[in-house]
Amino acid sequence: MSNIDLVRDDTKKRKRSTEVKLDRPFTFVKDYDKKAPLFKEIIEKDMQGMTNPLQLMKSYEERLSKKISYGNIDKKLDWLFQNGKVPKTLDGYYHGITVGMKTGFDSYTLLDTIRSKFKIGKDVDPTQLFHATLLSKSTPWAGKNFKKLTREKVSELTSGFDKGNKTTYLGINSFRNEEKGILNNIAVFLLPAIIETDSVAAPIGEKQSSYIYGKGGLFIAKKEKSVDPKAPDKEVMSLNYRWTKLDNKLPNTLLVDEIVEIAKGLCLGKLYFSTAARSFVKDYDPSVDKKDYKYRNFGYFLLMDDTWLHEKNMLFPKLAYKMADDLPKKFTTFCFEDKKKGKAIKAKAKLSKERTVLHYLRDLSNGIKEGPATEDKYFKEVQNLFVSAERPDGVEGYLRGGVVALKRGGFMRKFGTNLTNDIYPAVRLFSPWTGKTFTNVGMDVAKKYIGKDAEYYKDKGQIVLGTNTFKKNFDLSRPATAFIEQLDKIGMVVEQPTKEEKAEGIDLKSFYFMAHYEKSIIPECKGKGVLQFNYRWPKFHTMVPDCYCIDELVRVADGLYLGQLLYATDWEVPYDPKTKPSKYKYDNFGYFLLMDAEWQAIKEFMGFDMNQVL
């Protein structure tokens, strides 16, 4: 329905034609009524001059924010909701906007009393008036994150009531803290009293602005019939906060959100609270008939994916995510060893007060993902950055991980497309990898892990024992973590984290490597100084294909590192560190990132290479 041509014919001949062309059309259910009076009013009147549904939502939000009659906006929102579709998938982060609130109680005598006491017009909802006056321009709510659950976890979180036969997600809300918004700050201050929130590391200390401040308010989401007593047969995506094991607080223990897709990547949501007295004194019981909980609608909201982010920021600038007004130099300064090449890279990167080194890396990653036409060009830029960057002296501790792009190396070049990079977005859902740890060790520790081969490092200077780190999430990656936990049975090192590492979010360590400072083994790097990770030592018993892997790392900014994945493509040659690297035919299979907590916060803020963890 990208072109809707509705003709108004009052005297049996055309008097007026109204045409609305939508760049991003509605995606209603198949049997929606195109002649419905409310729909015709939306299209012929409300959407004049508009090109997409988000602009319509903005106009409704603005209308609801004024202390005047709202007309029948709530009925129009209800019509749009009733004709929306259940979204096919919800993996990842969705940006949120509150459209409006309403008083859901049935006691109209109470509403009349409130209106009379505060001199509020008959057609103005007191709850919406409160929201519009105090919070509409400074709301702390920023969006929701969704991750698929395994059947076992669904059953566990619902105390066995739900067997997980339908696709089910665990979700969590995100909140912003805007320093310049006094009311926002008050709301954020009060949030922990209502919602169990976990703070998110700030990339820029106390100078953060409109940054994702905290996460809280867990819910279980899946396709269900609506709790709305007026539309019990409507299929929706139900976001249920009421399950006891989610440990939510009042009023969230009364809450069920419902969402439907009204345009691709854009969902309209409604908040339903149980108003039954039993809800305040007894735990939620899913076997109780929905109508007995007396769910009532208390408001409307939007969720949208990244494809709507630019439009969202244009329409709702006060709710746009921002970097700080004055980022520390750490985030906008490259660490170059080759100053001449570095100058050219810096010119291309166009760093600014709000554009970091990580933004440039995201641009390169996106360019690679566009396809064969741009892939080689952007891979060359990544390699140029790698060769120009500093040797990463002093690396130690835990660094968070991320992927820039994977590459067709070795036999993969036989495919006409970059199959490795193409399938990564799907495969990463199953990956529990979170980063790497680095510990300076002596020869005694090196011998403990790789035996007599440790003699190789005797005159190599600093020796580093490295591990890859993994997290036990309640999602599709859980089977992969369970598999890694069993790798000790084939002789691989699998260790539990220390107390300090556990606090960093590390649940498991494996795929060990020895690292030292060396010249790159790839001819294209021309003897570049790197930190080289070696997974190939026989005593590690590293499984295929990582037993053929050598990683190399450089520093591109303070606390931000770029690595390249190198695999031997000739597996017939037995490994011996004295053998020339050219014999093994090492090839580049992609680039990854390692970073400190501050850079990780910016990465999460940007949504770069993020299947965001809860």
Image (spheres, rainbow, N blue to C red):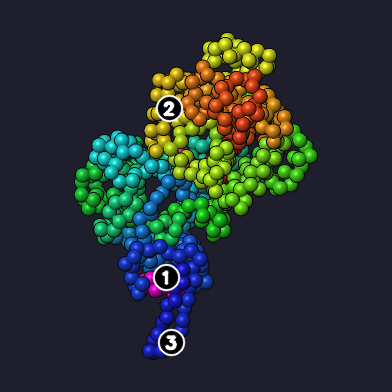
SS at mark 2 in the image: helix
What residue sits 53% from the left and 31% below the top?
435
Instruction: Give the mark, 3 or 1, whose residue is nearer the N terminus.
Output: 3
Instruction: Give the mark, 2 or 3, whose residue is nearer the N terminus.
Output: 3
Task: Please name whichever residue, 346 or 549, is drawn nearer the observer in this view of the structure.
Answer: 549
SS at mark 1 in the image: helix
- x and y percentages locating residue 135 in the rendered image: 48, 52
Q: CA distance from mark 3 to mark 1?
A: 20 Å
Classify mark 1: residues with Cα within 10 Å, few (<14), some (14-19) or many (20+): some
What residue sits 66% from the left and 24% below the top?
580
The vertical placement of 229 against 432, above or below, is below
Instruction: Please provide the residue range marked out in magenta.
Output: 37-46
Q: Is residue 356 magenta?
A: no
SS at mark 3 in the image: loop
| Residue 236 horizontal side relative to residue 436, left or right | left
Q: Which amino acid, mark 1? A: Ile
What residue sits 26% from the left and 36% below the top?
159
* For the residues bearing labels 2 and 1, Cβ distance under 8 angstroms: no
- x and y percentages locating residue 98 in the rendered image: 45, 54
The vertical placement of 503 against 148, above or below, is above
Q: CA distance from mark 2 to mark 3?
A: 70 Å
| Residue 387 horizontal side relative to residue 545, left or right | right
Label 3 belongs to which residue? 14
Report whether residue 116 is seen: no
Task: Please name whichever residue, 91 or 236, is drawn nearer the observer in this view of the structure.
Answer: 91
Label 1 belongs to which residue? 42
- Which disc is residue 484 wearing? 2
Q: Which amino acid, mark 3? A: Arg
Task: Please name whichever residue, 265 or 71, is drawn nearer the observer in this view of the structure.
Answer: 265
